[in-house]
Amino acid sequence: MPKSPLDTINRKILTSLQRDGRMAFHDLAARVGLTPSPTLRRVRLLEEAKIIRGYVAVVDQKAVGLPISIFASVKLERQREHDINRFATAVEGWPEVVECYLMTGQRDYLLRIVVPDLEAYEVFLKTKLTRLEGVGSIESSFALAQVKHTNVLPIP
């Protein structure tokens, strides 16, 4: 592999695999202008370098019965390391939370929560989020429509 792991060919590989992770190596090689063998070697090196972290199937949220997305802004009572770690550990165990970001600004965390209906969100709030020690306040916003969603990073 060239000195920089993200040369032009590797950028093409990453862009192609983000769009279609099941692409055959023969097709990927043709797209990036190499033969399959060096293409495979480059992909393996990108995987070893943890630039490619894995492969997934992108599932339609509504099609599997989870049409509701809620964005919850959470403020902790204190921003001590112990409190931040406790919150992060709890969130990792909640399957309803599909994204969680530690934020700057007025709120400490932004969560994207997916549920089948409002009752399920109420249960999530009452049995999980509001019971977690150290949570000071929660503001929920319900998504009306998804305008854009992509897993394809704009690799420069």
Image (spheres, grey):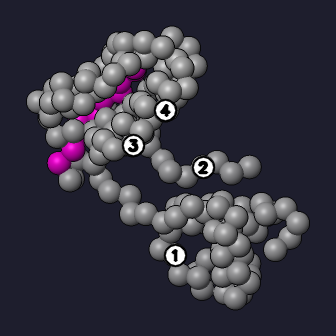
> At 37% across and 37% down in the image, what residue appears?
91
Question: Sequence-wise, which precedes: disc 4 or disc 2?
Answer: 4
Question: Sequence-wise, which precedes: disc 4 or disc 1?
Answer: 1
> Can the viewer see residue 30 in this picture?
no
The residue that disc 3 covers is: 92
Tell me, yes or no, whether the two marked residues, 3 and 2, touch with CB atoms within 8 Å.
no
SS for callout 3: helix
Stretch in magenta: 65-74
- How far, Cα to Cα, is label 3 from label 2? 23 Å
Amino acid type at image mark 2:
Leu
> At 24% across and 30% down in the image, what residue appears?
128
The residue that disc 2 covers is: 153
Examine the residues drawn in magenta and state their main secondary structure. strand
* Circle nearer the viewer, 4 or 1: 4
Q: Nearer the viewer, residue 109 or 118?
A: 109
- How far, Cα to Cα, is label 4 from label 2? 28 Å
Amino acid type at image mark 3:
Glu
> At 76% across and 68% down in the image, what residue appears?
9
SS for callout 1: loop
Question: Sequence-wise, which precedes: disc 4 or disc 3?
Answer: 4
Q: Is residue 62 above or below residue 19?
A: above
The residue that disc 1 covers is: 23
Is residue 67 shown in magenta? yes
